[in-house]
Amino acid sequence: MIARTKPLKYRRKPRLGDDGKYLDWVRSLPCLGCFASWYRELLSDWLRLCDGLPVGELRFSVADRLTFPPRQWSSAAHIGFSTSQRGLAQKYPDREAGPLCEEKHHSRHSKISIHTLGAERFFDGLALDRDQTLRMLAANYEEIHGEPAVRTAN
């Protein structure tokens, strides 16, 4: 009789752009959709700081500029920059993720979700610049954790 063995579990190979720590940090932030006005104010302050200071003097973090709104569970949605390209059935890199709540803004069943409206209409409705918001999140992560905001191939 042939002995049965356990089936092998499929392990996806790590890819360039995988960053679990960044996704954990994004999940700790409030939802972009529910707190859009808070993010608009934060983004406005961040852009003013970027324009007025040399890069070496830029000191900005989400927690330092404004107090956090009440805690809400968010998921790390792979939103992607508007110029990012990907193939069918492929997600954007982890560093292009933003926080969205599961109930309204990341659910496939909600009429106001990013999946239903599409990324452009979703961010137009929030009056948020998708690319600048993702850059701000990455810059904050880099400052807080001391890790580069964008990974490149060697």
Image: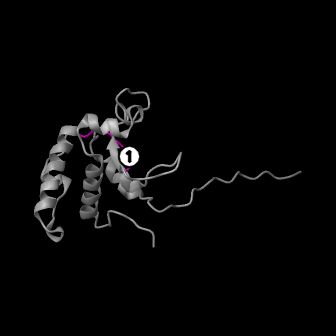
Against 70, residue 14 (above or below) is: below
Q: Which residue is mark 1?
A: 79
Q: Is residue 15 left or right of residue 105?
A: right
x, y percent for residue 152: 41, 67
Residue drawn at (24%, 62%) of the image: 144
x, y percent for residue 75: 37, 43
Residue drawn at (45%, 58%) of the image: 18
Against 51, residue 56 (above or below) is: below
Q: Is residue 128 magenta?
A: no
Residue extending furthest toward the right: 1
Residue extending furthest toward the bottom: 154
Q: How many marks?
A: 1
x, y percent for residue 101: 34, 37
x, y percent for residue 67: 14, 47
Whether residue 70 appears in this view of the structure is no
Residue span colored magenta: 71-80
Q: Secondary structure at mark 1?
A: loop
Quadrant in the picture for residue 51: bottom left
Give the camera-side residue of 125 and 146.
Answer: 125
